[in-house]
Image (cartoon, coloured by chain):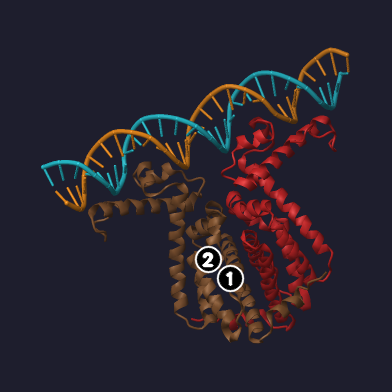
Chain colours: A brown, B red, C orange, D cyan
Amino acid sequence: MTELKASRAGGATRRQDFSAATRRDLLDVAQRLFTEQGYAATSLDSIVAGASVTKGALYHHFDSKTGVFEAVFTRVDEASAREIQQAVAAETDPWRQASGGLRVFLEVVRRPAYRRIVVQEGPAVLGPDRVRAEESRPTFALVHRILEGILGAGGWTTDDATVRTFSRLFFGALNTAGAAVALSDDPETEVARVEQVVGLLLAAVRQLVESGADLAEVTARVLPRDA
Amino acid sequence: MTELKASRAGGATRRQDFSAATRRDLLDVAQRLFTEQGYAATSLDSIVAGASVTKGALYHHFDSKTGVFEAVFTRVDEASAREIQQAVAAETDPWRQASGGLRVFLEVVRRPAYRRIVVQEGPAVLGPDRVRAEESRPTFALVHRILEGILGAGGWTTDDATVRTFSRLFFGALNTAGAAVALSDDPETEVARVEQVVGLLLAAVRQLVESGADLAEVTARVLPRDA
DNA sequence: TACGCGACCATACCGACGGTATGCAAACGA
DNA sequence: TCGTTTGCATACCGTCGGTATGGTCGCGTA
């Protein structure tokens, strides 16, 4: 991949540089193949062939095929989170943060790597134990923080558990929205529609929050606890 | 599985009865194993062994391993949709329909078969082409119809595409909510939290809808289209 | 009732894949 | 310079999804 591997990138010794280079090459090829063909259809042989190494090298750096996927998954997710974070950090008002973050997220989610690896195949490959640790995912943490700011605004202090549940719901909605956008024939107008709907939801929540209504009471009115 | 197969269940000829019985046995075993071990970890050999047949029988009824999964997927999804449909049909008011449907859905989604096969592994195994046809899924159709009623109430007629996008977002939120509930240490209180949050969202939307506000305008206010 | 036919399924086999055991060379610390 | 360890290559195995082929028994028909 890299013609002459890395020429003293930053590691202490030469050995470490070469090692890190082959590891990076493996991850690059794996990410490409996973994105193009999916996890199941991508063989380890094709990965090592693409990186011009053998399976010995792969199993030296990773413990299994799932391990390779997990490393790719983490890398893609972190890169996306960094990108969104930039847009969020540019604003201070929670609502404007949400606005900017949403726009960048809808941009990121259209990229094949994020969509296929993180959204589509990630949960199935890594399993529920990993999804359980969704709180540790950087993109989710971003959404959670923004929603904390929104729900906390106006002195609307709800307990942490509810905010976390709210974040999970919202995060799930965003992911499926992203999938819908990515698969759409006309992504541009689909993005516009998603922004409208999310805007509607946020506006509705905002109005309710700023009205100072009580959560439990409002909920009970809409979803009556019949006998 | 069934001791003496089916004894003239409903088919015209005896041959068809036996055939349908083995097919059903295969699906039963496959559903159990897919639920317990997941798609990848379930071998066709274990399926045919559980049904006391051979691979010849399996490949006579299905064209591939994915075909078996798809059949199981459809069966589980349809059964769940029927169950939810009953709760929905018991009400006429769209909001009460949503309330009842949500409660049953949160019950269904806690069952391992639905969670693992439909929510967790379905999208990854069947691929985006199938997810693209999400509109054809019975559970989604249910959500879509209810939300049509809600958004259409009060004369709030939005175009079909927006309603569909809204439904997709909401459906995605419900699925992740279901996963969160199923994986929770304390499912009961988690269900309560999800109902609160969904209630909050519905209440907020309801208030906004009934206020007769304009969608585009409201959205623009919350998510400003900066330069 | 004899019979030919086709649905239904069993058996045997193949190539590919994930994973492991072992060997080896070169770079590192001393 | 020398032993050690790190980084990787090679050879191999068990398992799995899928296929090709053959057999058998129920069923419509004459």
User: Upstream in the sequence, badge 2 or badge 1?
Assistant: 2
Inter-mark Cα distance, 2 to 1: 9 Å
Total marks shown come to 2
Chain ID of residue with mark 1: A
Amino acid type shown at disc 1: Arg
- The residue under label 1 is A164
At 65% from the left edge and 30% from the top edge, which residue is drawn?
B56
Q: Where is residue B51 in the image (x, y as percent from the top left)?
A: 69, 35
Residue that badge 2 annotates = A135
In the image, residue B222 sits, relative to residue B169, either above or below, namely below
Proximity of marks 2 and 1: CB atoms separated by less than 8 Å: yes
* Residue A33 shows in the view: no
- Badge 2: few (under 14), some or many (20 or more) residues near its Cα, within 10 Å? some
Q: Position of residue B215 (x, y in %)?
A: 66, 79
x%, y% of residue A12? 24, 59
Neighbor class of circle 1 (other Cα within 10 Å; few <14, some 14-19, many 20+) is some
Q: Which amino acid does label 2 sit on?
A: Glu
Label placed on residue B202: none
